[in-house]
């Protein structure tokens, strides 16, 4: 009678046998090595196309649609003033934004033109004024021409006009001085004296050959020293007397 084999025992034996073979296979397994030679290396001989960039390519991307960052700029005082003026025109005249902006532009242009014309007018008037006055009408005889300048440039001074302007201003003492310098100028032009700013009245007196003119010049020199260098106000009588003597001497040269 054949002994009976337990089926569970057979299954267990099969599993043990399979596991052992698998373990032996992993333990003794070898790795396959592949060897390559130069013949296996392929060289790519296709030409690579060259790429060229336009030097001005950056200029194509300067439009607003390529601008991703915008710098915030603060408005100037002039921009704020124009905006205020536009709003003022809107409020006063009830204008639209476009009409108000146009009105402001016209107003600014007109005002600028008026200011420029006014400046040009004042400059021309100050230079070409026939009365020898500046733009505000005040006589500049005493301010522009000093006493030293008059004596230094005696031959170029228009004493007749200078005396006329001085008498209008009421400065009688200064008018006497101009009359006296006018006499010196005429005598120098007539070669009666040799004019020199460093000379004294006595020096000129000795240079005059005419006895009559020498006597008249001596008297007007006395009046001039008395009135010009005297620290007091002269009355009308004294001034009229000196004026007649000076004009008489001036006419006799």
Image: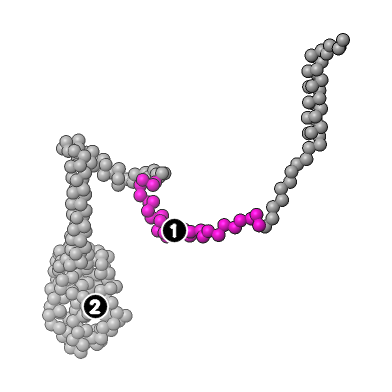
Q: Residue 231 location in percent, x, y?
A: 27, 65
Please identify the residue farthest to the bottom as the structure is shown: 209
Q: Which structural element holds mark 2? A: helix
Q: Residue at position x 24%, y 87% from top? A: 207
Circle nearer the N terminus (1, 2): 1
How far apart marks 1 and 2 lie (CA) works out to 81 Å
Q: Residue 234 location in percent, x, y?
A: 20, 65
Q: Which quadrant would the C terminus be assigned to in this image?
A: bottom left
Q: What segment carries the magenta color?
A: 39-67
Which coloring applies here?
Answer: one colour
Question: Do we see residue 215 in this rendering?
Answer: no
Q: Residue 166 location in percent, x, y?
A: 18, 66
Horizontal side, residue 41 vs residue 148: left or right: right
Q: Nearer the viewer, residue 128 or 179?
A: 128
Say the numbered circle drawn on residue 53: 1
Q: Nearer the viewer, residue 222 or 29?
A: 29
Main SS of the magenta part reads loop
Q: Are marks 1 and 2 in contact (CB under 8 Å)?
A: no
Q: Residues within 10 Å of mark 1 (few under 14, many from 20)?
A: few
Q: Which quadrant would the N terminus be assigned to in this image?
A: top right
User: Which residue in the protein does label 2 denote?
Assistant: 154
Q: Residue at position x 78%, y 40% from top? A: 30
In this rendering, the answer to whether 231 lies above or below 58 is below
In this rendering, the answer to whether 144 lies above or below 28 is below
Res 247 → quadrant: bottom left
Horizontal side, residue 71 vs residue 160: left or right: right
Q: Residue 185 location in percent, x, y?
A: 21, 80
Q: Residue at position x 24%, y 78% from top? A: 154
Res 208 → quadrant: bottom left
Residue 52 in the magenta stretch? The answer is yes
């Amino acid at each position: 009678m054949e002994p009976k084999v337990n089926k569970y025992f057979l299954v267990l034996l099969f599993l043990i046998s399979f596991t052992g073979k698998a373990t032996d296979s992993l333990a003794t397994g070898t790795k396959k090595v592949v060897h390559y030679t130069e013949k296996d290396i392929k060289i790519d001989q296709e030409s690579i196309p060259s790429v060229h960039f336009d030097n001005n390519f950056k200029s194509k991307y300067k439009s607003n649609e390529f601008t991703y960052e915008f710098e915030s700029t603060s408005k100037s005082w002039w921009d704020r003033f124009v905006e205020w003026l536009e709003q003022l025109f809107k409020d006063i005249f009830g204008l639209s934004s476009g009409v108000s902006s146009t009105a402001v532009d016209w107003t600014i242009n007109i005002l600028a033109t008026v200011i420029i014309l006014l400046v040009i007018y004042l400059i021309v008037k100050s230079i070409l004024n026939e009365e020898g006055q500046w733009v505000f009408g005040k006589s500049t005889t005493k301010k522009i021409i000093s006493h030293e300048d008059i004596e230094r440039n005696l031959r170029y001074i228009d004493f007749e006009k200078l005396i006329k302007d001085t008498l209008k201003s009421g400065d009688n003492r200064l008018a006497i001085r101009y009359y006296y310098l006018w006499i010196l100028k005429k005598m120098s032009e007539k070669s009666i004296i040799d004019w020199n700013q460093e000379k004294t009245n006595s020096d000129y007196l000795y240079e005059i050959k005419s006895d009559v003119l020498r006597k008249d010049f001596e008297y007007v020199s006395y009046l001039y020293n008395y009135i010009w260098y005297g620290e007091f106000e002269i009355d009308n009588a004294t001034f009229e007397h000196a004026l007649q003597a000076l004009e008489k001497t001036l006419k006799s040269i």
